[in-house]
Image (tube, rainbow, N blue to C red):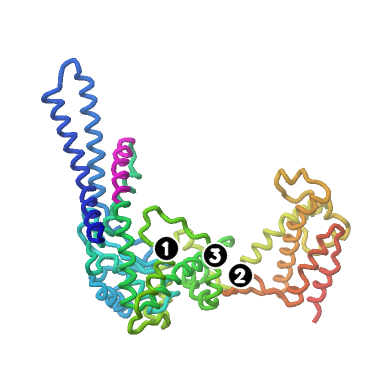
Amino acid sequence: MTFRLRALRALVLLAGFHLMGAGLLAAMGVLDWLLVTRWLTERAAWSEGCVLTLTVFVAVAIARGMLASLRAGRLGPARHAVAVAPEDQPELWAEVRAAARATGERPPDELHLVGEVNAGVAEQSRLLGLLPGRRRLTLGLPLLAGLTVPQLRAVLAHEFGHFGNGDTRLGGVTMRGREAVLQTVRAFDGGGTWMHHSVGRLYVAYARMFLRASQSVARQQEVAADQVAARHAGREATAAALRATPVLAAAHSHYLATYAALGEPVAALPPVGEVSGGFRRMLAARTAEQLAGLAAGRRPPRPHPYDSHPPTAERIALIEQLPPGGDDRSAGPGALTLLRGADQLFAELEACALPPEAAAMRRMEWDELVLARAVADAEGWSRPLRLAVARALRSQAPDGELPGLAEILDAFDRGVLWPEAADRMPKPPQAARLTGVAARNFVRPRVFDALAGLVHLHLVASGRATADIAWSGQPGLALPEVWEEGMDEALDAATADTPDTAPLRTLLAAGRRP
């Protein structure tokens, strides 16, 4: 079956999605008419009345489904996004319009910037995508931060290629229809009555049939959109954009977890505009190999059974088979250079994306934030050991102050660690039954971490440990070289079966010398 015939079949099935509800309502109307005019008898009045009542409830559920299908495809409000007008960002809009012209499509009516590694064109389609409507282009600022201008051209051309592409116009209708059908099914999932869900099963079954029938059309449309992107931006730029996108997504997830959320335990945020904007700093500090390593350890998401995207490797292979274009290169200026006032845009995005409770947090410079987080972590690591030693010695100060590093080292020298303090360290119920060597080996890593936390607190208080944002690594404390070289061995000696605190005391004394 040719592509046009497959697209036409999908189009007919899409129209049938609308007609299914009308057909069901007509069938129930005929049934009710026959019951009232032909079959109604005095002996069966009660049962026939139940049937009439049931058909009314079913008709209401079907009518709601038809209304949901008519509303499917509507553009809702753009949440957590910054709208940019052509007069505010003319360079970016020029690239957008050029990509639209290259695909033979009209440009978007709206352009919104979001805080995700994503790009997409949404359309307020009507009649399940059979009729086009208002268009909205969404671009992620983190995506722009990691792409070059040629790669962005390829992304834009691909997104517009979903809707047109010469002899595959029916494919564009199919793509709109698939999204609208999925939105209709979601509307049934949100229904509140069993009848609503029961009728929804009919729509879900039909939707699955339509999605299966249109799967090949949707995949062909993705391949065609890649070809349009390659003609507009070049083969190399298109393939490079496909390779870069999953890497950027993994890098952005790492950034959010490692840097943007750094101040969460201390109820603080990075400077204004840096919650998302700091991603630029991490990208600039890391090599391509380091960024690829962030993606290498991630398990790829499980493909959706109706996903329209062929595997990325397959798409890249098809692109590389295309003839090279006139200006076939992926290198170039960063896509963020197309924006005027990028710092302000990151700040505006942050203002509308952060929840109210986060927006009320105090702001700290990156180094201050790293130091505050390091101190909070060190206090958390050391507290169980300090409590255990205080209980073992019964020496907690009246004001609630727990023993410090010097007092704990003295306690270790007096043999308090094993077993008095170790037995008082928190542990799961299974480990509480351990004794002897097994018990010591279970608790030892926790004592090691707690003692390391105390050392960090001591070095911070004495000014010998400084904050290290480490955009190319892991944020934390920068310790003096002598501590970097000898700290682990000194901690191992202090937590041995026969504790020896001399190496740790030597390091502490060395730091105090002029």
**Crowd class of label 3 (few under 14; some 14 to 19; many from 20; radius 10 Å):** many
Looking at numbered disc 3 in the image, what kind of residue is underneath it? Ala
Which residue is at 23% across, 38% downward?
60
Picture quadrant where residue 297 is located: bottom right
Gap between marks 1 and 3 measured at Cα: 41 Å
Where in the figure is residue 451, as x and y percent of width and height?
A: 75, 62
Please give left or right for residue 134 compared with residue 138 in the image.
left
Q: Are marks 1 and 3 in contact (CB under 8 Å)?
A: no
Where in the figure is residue 471, as x and y percent of width and height?
A: 57, 74
State whether residue 344 is above or below residue 400. below
Which mark lies nearer to you, 2 or 1? 1
Looking at numbered disc 1 in the image, what kind of residue is underneath it? Pro
Which mark lies nearer to you, 1 or 3? 1
User: Residue reaching furthest left?
Assistant: 37
Q: Disc 3 designates what residue? A: 268
Which mark lies nearer to you, 3 or 2? 2
Where in the figure is residue 172, as x and y percent of width and height?
A: 25, 62
Magenta extent:
194-210
Of the numbered discs 1 and 3, the one sitting upstream in the chain is: 3
Please give left or right for residue 245 compared with residue 84 in the image.
right
Gap between marks 2 and 1 measured at Cα: 32 Å
State whether residue 408 is above or below residue 463. above
Residue 293 visible in the snapshot: yes
Q: Disc 2 designates what residue? A: 474
Of the numbered discs 2 and 1, the one sitting upstream in the chain is: 1
Q: What secondary structure predominates along the stretch shown in magenta?
A: helix
Looking at numbered disc 2 in the image, what kind of residue is underneath it? Gln
Q: Give the structural element (helix, strand or loop) at label 3.
A: strand
